[in-house]
Amino acid sequence: MRTFLSARRNNVQCGQECPHSVKALILLPFLLLFGCVSTETAFDGGFRVVRKDDHNLLFHGTTQLLCDFRRDALDLAPAEAYCIGEGERAFIENPQQAYWEPFARKGRFSETEPLSLVPMAGRDVVPVPEGITQLDTPGLTRNSVSYVLDANGKRTVFTGNLIYGDGQILNLYDFQDKWEGANIGGYHGYMARVPKLIASLGKIKALNPDTLIPARGPAIENPQHAIDTLIARLQEVYLNYLSINALWWYFGVDTMTASGRLIFGDRPIPRMPEAQKFAQPPWITEFATTRILHALDGSAFVIDCGGKREFERIVKMVEDGKIKRIEGVFVTHYHHDHVPGVAPLVEKYDCPVYCSPVSRPILERPGAFRMPCVADVPLRNIRCVESLDWAEYNIRFMHFPGQTLYHDAALVTRKGGRPILFVGDSFSPTGIDDYCIWNRNLLEEDQGYFHCLKTVRDMDPRPLLINQHIPPPFEFDDARIEYMLNQLRLRYALLSALFPYPVNFGMDPCWARFEPYCAKPGDMPKLIIRNHAKVPLSFYVDGQLLFRDIPPGEETAIRWPILPYFTKSVSIRCREIPALQTSTETFVAHGE
């Protein structure tokens, strides 16, 4: 059922004014419910909204008006040209030059500010059509825009991905960025784009709109309440994040407090008390991110080797007689400040590399993964064992998914001494190192930092902790561990309200991914989907139901042929949860 209404323009006091009257064809609200295959809302003046697969696509004639560059809505309905904000025009007009070619040259390893859903191919871009106002509203992307349309005394704002439903957003990982006003870089920039999102929401709220049409989901008929709810939820999440964060140790009180002020103003920030610190044992040599364990017989065991300087220093220690033999190397994780010196060390001394079975693939084939700060240094001679007895030491190796999903720890016990757990970059005396969401910090009671904290809690005797960047060992007592666990449980509840689907879908940018990420023409990589829900889920891939009833908490993979193109992208949509959608790609590297 459709009802035709004539309308008279109200001028919009921002950006480009609507120059003529608009008449609207209003689609009744029930047509915006989940499950509609394709419906349409038309406005006089050539504007229309096509709703398909939970997307709301704004058109003027045959031109699609985009709020941001994300490719998930580009091919759902035919368009001859596209309109977008000037700040993101290049991603639509020439994405190869604007993004993918620089990514191929220098970005796909040591990546610190990832972008998701960049288009694959260029499209024609045209100016904003008359009759609608384009408004700068950065948020999920750095330069996204919204569109304001007045009709029949009512104001509708097309908000793109700024908001979903009654105060929700689609994910947190796309808000990772460098902070403006807090001196925190992109890799450490958890929710750094949220201050801009809040400002954009405030700008839209000040227009007093009657309806918001987001890029995804149903129309929002109570904009003021939805905006206030979203802002409040975001503030609570960031306040919770700061309460147990490792960056207080690295960056200091002024910097971290400044980041909080940008999101929630002058509210007090409750924090875990800093952990007690201890003297470094004399049998450990520490420099940069490297630790060397010394045995009484002159042999040594290395934990991480971050680069050429660290490698050369170890060589000199051998040449000077301070080390008689390298027994082995343990790698805490794959990051480019922990791994590059390991390969030459193994080559020179023919020593084994130790890690968990979970970490082995990314160390042997770093190009198979798109993760931040991956070092382009494949390692060989890897051994996956639970325990090693060496000289007067016992070393237990374990998967320890703290700072990143592919992260390990080593519990070192020296005869007669207190055990020390080498935790890589997972803890500091002020809390947990979960500042980069692209590291895949999963949130369930048996995952991520829940698992790590419970592992430390259950160790008897309680070990000291050593972070590869922090000289003094420190200790998490029962009170601090319980405080962190309780804050993580609170965060889980907060995020459950913030996302329109199970929490880890909003925290894991790789719940759908190709492996290897970097393929070659003719390869058949695996397309992998991980079900973060507590019920079985099925998924469409490019419109075909290819994944059926993936069990809760498990991954399923299918082989996908790759033609000799620069990249291959597929769209993915959940059958049971219409809001749950993404697009993923495999990067085709020629000449490697």
Image (cartoon, helix red, strand yellow):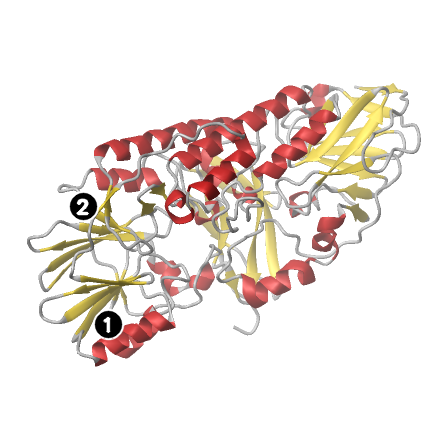
* Relative to 169, residue 395 above or below: below
- The one of 497 and 307 positioned closer to us in this rendering: 307
Residue 447 visible in rendering: no
Pointer 2 residue: 463
Q: Residue at x 71, y 23 (%)?
A: 31
- Circle 1 crowding by C-alpha within 10 Å: few under 14, some 14–19, many from 20: many
- Report crowding for label 2: few under 14, some 14 to 19, many 20 or more residues within 10 A (C-alpha): many
Residue 276 seen in this snapshot: yes
Q: Earlier in the sequence, mark 2 or mark 1?
A: 1
Which one is nearer the viewer's eye here, 245 or 255?
255
Q: Which quadrant would residue 376 be assigned to in this image?
A: bottom left
Q: Amino acid at mark 1?
A: Cys
Q: Position of residue 287 (x, y in %)?
A: 30, 64
Left or right for 252, reference 543: left
Which mark's residue is nearer the viewer, 2 or 1? 2
Between 590 and 419, the residue placed more toward the observer is: 419
